[in-house]
Image (cartoon, grey):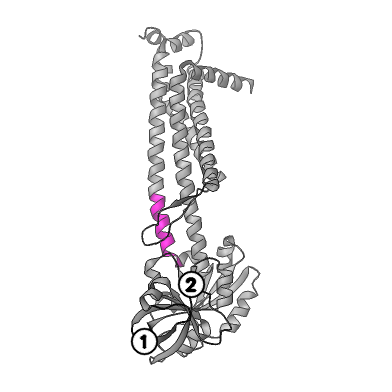
Amino acid sequence: MNGLWMWLKFAWHNCLRNRRRSLVTASIAMLGTAAILLAGGFAQFTYESLAQAAARDTGHLVLGTPAHFSADEDVPLQHGLDDVAALRSALLADPAVRAVLPRVVFSGLISNGDKTAVMMAQGVEPDAEFAVKGPFLTLQEGALLAGDAAQPQVLLGADLARSLKATPGSSLTLLASTTEGAMNAMDVVVAGTFSTGVPDVDKRAVYTSVPVAQQLLATQRVSSLGVFLDRMESTAAARERLGQQFAPLQVQTWEQQAFFYQSVRGLYNRIFGALGIIIGVIVVFVVTNAMAMAVIERTREIGTLRALGTLPAQLLRSLGLEGMLLGGAGALAGALLALGVALLLLLFPVDMPPPPGRSVGYPLSVSVDPALYLLTMLAMVLLTLLASLLVARKTVHMPVVDALGHT
């Protein structure tokens, strides 16, 4: 231990011999570390946010018939679920299941008498849906659906309501094909308008209650059951367990339903992976250049030490520790810088501009993952150590006479 401390102290004093060069090298390592941690933290925050949004939208698990997930329907709810009450009771008996929400998905037309528009509608259980799923939409006018309303109610997307000139209290007519293929109509009252932040969705989205949807479609079926668990980490185990319990029905996870999440994760992994490689290469080149200059300047010193009996392995260890100290100091400073930026973003929120396809922005935030910090700092230290050893290897094995005569 004393020997290692002596070599570290020796390497530290050598780093201080040219403080400006050492400062520049450590600064590059610091900026590289901070950039990797901030980019990785932003990517992790994005993944976590999209995962939570996807799980709130569909449920952690989705129970349906196999054809519901793989085949198109000729008529509404052709591949729907029967005996929903019994399925819900069985699902709620599982200790990891927090709530089970039925959903009826259908399309049709919505009219104010003068104008008709295409709608993409969902029948939900109002009280449970909006309580369990949290803020998955922003109510703009009116109120949410009431489970005990005297008249059939709908919630309209903001752009659809604007197109139909509908406001809370307006009367509209829903038209859809029943499960028998006949057309059916129903008069409804607008309870309120909402925005999901996605204009293409707000132009077509309609929410109503499950009983209203079933009455319109002339069926007692539902499209699927959304299963909400006690925590996200229970998803894999619960899927395996419930998949066996409810065979031959099929259970899918939120991730299998979240195509946008999968696309964004794949894209960000490639972008930030390439960014990390580029930053790592830059740091390696900077450290290599700094250590090469240090070794060239000290070639005669190295020859003198060799003549006094110092072994090449000892010199290589000293020069390697110099690079490791520079990389370690830079990595530590970079981690502190990234942590400071992450905390500042919590204290002073910054809004990002709306992404493509959305009408609202979102707060910029950076996740602080101890594993990511540890791995990044370790990688930076190892890269600088290897770069130093690579540069110094040839010089420390140079013949003593040639090293002493170097100019």
Percent of width and height locating residue 366: 50, 48
Real-space Cα distance between discs 1 and 2?
22 Å
Number of other residues with Cα within 10 Å of mark 2, as a class: few under 14, some 14 to 19, many 20 or more: some
Q: Which mark is first along the chain, 2 or 1?
A: 1
Which residue carries the number 2 mark?
Answer: 141
Of residues 124 and 11, which is closer to you in this image? 124
Of residues 27 and 69, which is closer to you in this image? 27
Instruction: Tell me if residue 327 is in the magenta stretch.
Output: no
Q: In this picture, is 90 found above or below 187? A: above
Of residues 324 and 391, which is closer to you in this image? 324
The numbered dot on residue 113 is 1
Q: In this picture, is 138 found above or below 320? A: below
Amino acid type of the residue that numbered disc 2 sits on in the rendered structure: Glu
Number of other residues with Cα within 10 Å of mark 1, as a class: few under 14, some 14 to 19, many 20 or more: few
Where does the magenta region start and end? 257-270
Residue extending farthest left: 115
Percent of width and height locating residue 345: 51, 46
Dots 1 and 2: beta carbons under 8 Å?
Answer: no
Percent of width and height locating residue 224: 50, 77
State whether residue 19 appears in this view: yes
Query: Magenta region's main secondary structure?
Result: helix
